[in-house]
Amino acid sequence: MPRTATLPPTAPGTDRPVLSRWPRLAAAVVPVAAVAVVGSLATSPNIPTWYAGLAKPDFTPPNWLFPVAWTILYALIAFSGWRLLGIAPATGSLRRTRTLALWAFFVQLALNGAWTPVFFARHDPAGGLVVVVALLIMILWTIRLVLPLDRLAALVLVPYAAWVSYATALNAAIWWMN
């Protein structure tokens, strides 16, 4: 496995921390929490109205399962981001991989945040399908990029990829049926 190291406590030649524990925790948790809040605000008013009136496939889970699943997944996503933000690869190629992994991580998070307003607030299953397919691709790419940097940070994203695969099938079925 390639050599990686945790971030040093101070930047070379300075007394300043590079990224101390609390800023790293905030950088991992705040964007995930923001996505969760946006999702909740876009979803909640539409569940009993628009979503309830849609034709849905037999494999649609009960409504109570979605917030339970997403709470667990958002915790795993934040944990993965926290770990990713805390590593400093020892080689140049892994440094580039880390930079790309961070970009991929935050792009997939932005796509996650975009799906709910498109699907629920705009009542657009076709647009939601486009977003969720892009989201799934970005999650898989993020896992691929993170894997050589931090195996655990990559592996905790696997349930997220599985759930979004399921959500993609559900979104496609809802689009097809409506």
Image (cartoon, rainbow, N blue to C red):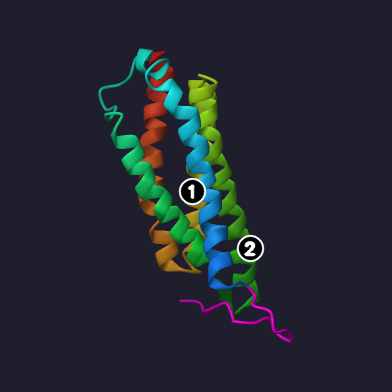
Categorize mark 2 by other alpha carbons within 10 Å: few (<14), some (14-19), many (20+). Answer: some
Secondary structure mostly seen in magenta is loop
Q: Compare residues 168 and 124 and report the one nearer the observer.
A: 124
Q: Can residue 135 be seen in the rendering of this structure?
A: no
Q: Can residue 2 be seen in the rendering of this structure?
A: yes
Position in image of residue 97 (x %, y %): 60, 65
Q: How many marks?
A: 2
Residue drawn at x 44%, y 21% is 46
Q: Say whether marks 2 and 1 touch (CB < 8 Å).
A: no
The residue at the far right in this view is 13
Residue drawn at x 39%, y 20% is 174
Q: In this view, does 46 lie above or below 37?
A: above
The residue labelled by disc 2 is: 99
Position in image of residue 66 (x %, y %): 34, 36
- Secondary element type, mark 2: helix
Position in image of residue 41 (x %, y %): 49, 31
User: Magenta stretch: residue 16 in it?
Assistant: yes
Q: Compare residues 44 and 80 and report the one nearer the observer.
A: 44
Tell me where the magenta segment starts and ends, as one range. Answer: 1-18
The Cα atoms of the two marked residues, 2 and 1, are separated by 16 Å
Q: Earlier in the sequence, mark 2 or mark 1?
A: 2
Q: Is residue 82 above or below residue 162?
A: below
User: Magenta stretch: residue 110 in it?
Assistant: no
Query: Mark 1 is on which residue type?
Result: Ile
The residue labelled by disc 1 is: 139
Residue drawn at x 40%, y 66% is 152
- Secondary element type, mark 1: helix
Position in image of residue 168 (x %, y %): 42, 33
The label number, if any, that marks residue 157 in the structure image: none
Residue drawn at x 41%, y 13% is 178
Query: Mark 2 is on which residue type?
Result: Thr
